[in-house]
Image (cartoon, rainbow, N blue to C red):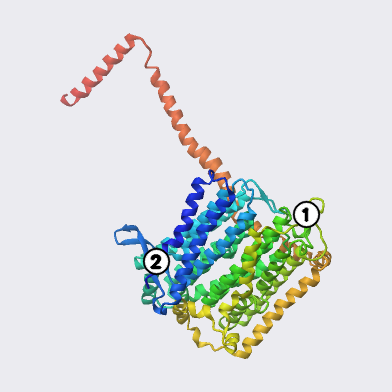
Amino acid sequence: MSPLLHPGLIVLFPLIGFAIIGLFGTRIKSEKLIGAIGSGAVFFSFLVAVSLFVQMLGAPAESRSFTSTVYTWIATGSFSVDIAYKIDQLSILFALIITGIGFLIHVYSIGYMHGDKSFFRFFAYLNLFVFMMLNLVLANNLLLTFLGWEGVGLASYLLIGFWYNRKFDGTNIVWTGDAAKKAFIVNRIGDFGVLVAMFLLFQQFGTLNYDAITAGAQSAWGVGDATVTIITLALFLGATGKSAQIPLGVWLPDAMAGPTPVSALIHAATMVTSGIYLIARTNVLFAMSPTTMAVVTGIGITTALIAGTVGLVQNDIKKVLAYSTVSQLGFMFTALGVGAFTIAVFHVMTHAFFKALLFLGSGSVIHGMHEEQDIQKMGGLAKHMPITYRTWIIGTLAISGIPLFSGFFSKDEILLFSFYYGSPVLWAVGALAAFFTAFYMWRLTALTFHGKERFDHHHVHPHESPATMTIPLIVLAVLSAVGGFLGVPHLLGHPLHIPNLLESWLHPIMDAGVQTLGMGSVTMDPTTEILLMAGSVTIALAGVFLARNLYKDGTERASALGAKFSAAYKLLWNKWYVDEIYHLAVVGPILALSRDFLWKIFDVKIVDGVVNGSASTVGAVAGVLRKLQSGIAQNYAVLMVVGIVILIGVVLWPLL
């Protein structure tokens, strides 16, 4: 297939926007012009992606995948890496999500960041992030992917710490700069795994090209080979960092310190799904390692459950959504672990719709409440912010898994595959996590929009957000409502003659991994499917009605219930003490080692001792030698005579 537009343009436009705003932002006095440049750059990328997508739809299935090379990046000996972009069904889907939702978030940011003294810097960072993220998903080789991988880490650091002089979270004071550093450092741990995997793959195949790696793995390794297990575990370590899974997920809740559009862009639709993309792209490698698949499943479902429990008691509106994101990512990894690669990507898409909507909705609430984020100080906002409220409800219905909204289709498919290709226990734990999701989202809704007003009317005057903020909410609400119909399961779609478009679209990419797993050997019983679907819907509705009943009058009834289970509440309020455990087991010992040994002993006594000791030695020797410079000519003459005698003696000694 010969593309009408060069795929490199998708990546180029955000880079141009970053360069223009970054270099000339201080001279451009108009916020509207800066917003137009930043938003326009991403919109043009979206148009190119749409053009390629439409062209791919009209092409035969076997010719929809192609690689476009820009130039040779590295060429040394037998090793060569190109700046080359692989356009296929998976990469174009992610490109559409990144640029489409990214454009909406850019437009939203024009209103949200209005009046900020570093308005231009914010849009420059946003464009830089989109540029790096597009490199990550469009690259045809692992090294270029890693460039984007590290680039989004840098851009996220800049965006999380954008308000570097502010504090975040009235309960646990966190400087935004500290939150940015925490995200950066934790992600570096995961990135080490990706580096190890790259070294091992190059050692095995002499290339980092995805197609060559897949072909080489299928011919060189068998299922369960130790080498592929080590490589996939290393890749998964990287995925746990970027996608905030246990044990490297501690950075994401604190990352809410950044402006709300950052939370929507990075922690809902793009960066945190990098790990999902990496595993989906290398699905054949993962399918060849049952051990790694089991680890992915276990980590995913554990993360989904634990993050869901923590979300039950959070009072910061963005913190609730942050733990919700971690939990939903756990669902995606659970799907990957049982071999439902397409379903995981499906949930990436639906999650991008409704979670971006919810984050932007929370930003609208914060904007209307004059920067207040504590839901205990809200209530009754539905009448003050009608557009925000209605779109919020759609997003909440979607994430809760209520039928016909987008989250219902993808979440239910994950639970279904967990039952058939995992175990009934895995389904039950996933269903419990889904119950928590519905509960904390409707708790959040009730305390924010329903009931009595609990804010200070003298200082806070809630109001609806401007059109630049509400129009993206409306678009995302529509996508959250109908986006799930792109992946209607066969049980529902077949009687209604609705095809599963996403499954057929991604089939060429995921088929090899699915065949390696032998997933066609299990036959799904329609009756069991219906019962499982009914069960998951019932559980979600139970969470909705329980939360609405418990919080309809504010927090009084919930507080009484919390007092009865104070130990459990304290555990969840302190987030299972994960940060404390990290500090006790990792941070504290490293600080003690650095302070008490590396600084006070090694640096002060050894390093400084050697330097200062050598200076003292030189000084002492110089003091002795200085006495020879007495200034008395007779002494110098004596020394010269003694020297001459010694030299004559040395010369004549062998002749004696």
In the image: residue 556, left or right of residue 52: right
Name the residue rendered at 78%, 57% in the picture. 377
Circle 2: residue type: Leu
Residue 404 in which image quadrant: bottom right
Q: Secondary structure at mark 2?
A: helix
Near mark 2 (Cα within 10 A), the count class, few <14, some 14-19 or many ≥20, is many
- The answer to whether residue 583 shows anywhere in this view is no
Q: CA distance from mark 2 to mark 1?
A: 58 Å
Q: Earlier in the sequence, mark 2 or mark 1?
A: 2
- The answer to whether residue 616 shows anywhere in this view is yes
Q: How many marks?
A: 2
Near mark 1 (Cα within 10 A), the count class, few <14, some 14-19 or many ≥20, is few
Q: Secondary structure at mark 1?
A: loop
Q: Nearer the viewer, residue 185 or 253?
A: 253
Q: Which residue is mark 1?
A: 461
Q: Nearer the viewer, residue 281 or 184?
A: 281
Looking at the rendered image, the quarter that the C terminus falls into is top left
Residue 470 x, y percent position in the rendering: 66, 62
Q: Nearer the viewer, residue 620 or 450?
A: 450
Residue 412 x, y percent position in the rendering: 62, 79
Circle 1: residue type: His
In the rendered image of this protein, does residue 471 appear above or below residue 119?
below
Residue 101 x, y percent position in the rendering: 57, 64
Residue 596 x, y percent position in the rendering: 58, 44
In the image: residue 160, left or right of residue 463: left
Disc on res. 201 = 2
Residue 363 in which image quadrant: bottom right
Looking at the rendered image, the quarter that the N terminus falls into is bottom left
